Amino acid sequence: MPCRALREPGGKACGTTAPYARREEDAEKAAHAINDGYAELTRRYPDRFLAHVSLPLPHIDASLAEMRRGMDELGMCGVAMNCSVFNRSTAEQEFEPLYAEIDQRGAILDFHPRGNGICSPMVNDYGLGAAGTLMEDTVIALHLIVRQIPHRFPNIRVIISHLGGMMPVVLNRLDHQLRFGHPNLPEPPSVTARRFYYDTVGHGSDAALLCAWKAFGAGHLLPGSDWPVLLIDESYSETFGYIRDVGLPSPDVEQILESNAPALFNVRAGVG
């Protein structure tokens, strides 16, 4: 999804990777253009690409219509959403009609940071966007857990970007302490977190990949490229090579690189 900037109240520009606009007409036009472009790409190279539907948020009815167009007419395999929409979590109640539609279809829902530093001056005023994206990954996973989205919409297959941010290192703490603020969770938070899938984008950090592998298991890690951002600092061979070089068991490496994504996306290995 092409990057652009939106201007928030107060004049501050915020990065985004989705066709979100306050005017419904603008959001619809942007979403149509993006989805039509991706649909053409997948038609041209059906053995190489699948696509997710970009939604014209925060407009729910328009987003439902575009989701149906994208999946029913354009042949897309899931839905892409940012972790927030105009500084509001996409786990909030107003977005539940979208979850209901995705759940009914048993489709994939792929979350990506918006680049707003979780709306925190303690992140943004210090220029810590590099860490802010990981905080967004962490926060959306936590929001989904405490809102019980995976239990109320169990057929959604959720993907969280960037190894889940800080999720791999907080699972035990969540199990110990989250119950005080959320006493009615149906299961330990770590169990819910292990229902999600996480991409392997870690900027070559062996420690981050090993931590996510230990936390979630090889079966819930998907190869990710973070195109085109990661190409600034490393080649594709490095992006995927570190998965082979980190010291994981060979069967787990092959599962991560060759098996998990085809199984999740319901395609034969080597396609998509």
Image (cartoon, grey):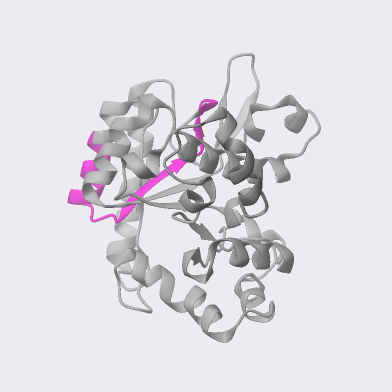
Q: Is residue 111 left or right of residue 29?
A: right
Answer with the quarter of the image where residue 185 lies.
top left
Q: Which residue is at the front of the view, 179 or 88?
A: 179
Q: In this view, does 258 lie to the left or right of 216?
A: left
Say whether residue 204 is visible: yes
Q: How many labels does the image show?
A: 0
Q: Which quarter of the rendering shows the C terminus? A: bottom left
Say whether residue 160 is visible: no
Magenta extent: 65-88
- Residue 53 lies, in percent from the top left, at 34, 47
Question: Height in image: 178 above or below 259?
Answer: above
Question: Height in image: 197 above or below 111?
Answer: below
Residue 84 part of the magenta segment: yes
- Residue 39 lies, in percent from the top left, at 30, 55
The residue most toward the left is 73
- Residue 267 lies, in percent from the top left, at 30, 71
Answer with the quarter of the image where residue 99 lies.
top left
Residue at 26 percent across and 27 percent down: it is 61
Residue at 49 percent across and 53 percent down: it is 191
- Residue 45 lies, in percent from the top left, at 33, 69
Question: Height in image: 11 above or below 99?
Answer: above
Residue 258 part of the magenta segment: no
Q: Which residue is at the front of the view, 247 or 245?
A: 247
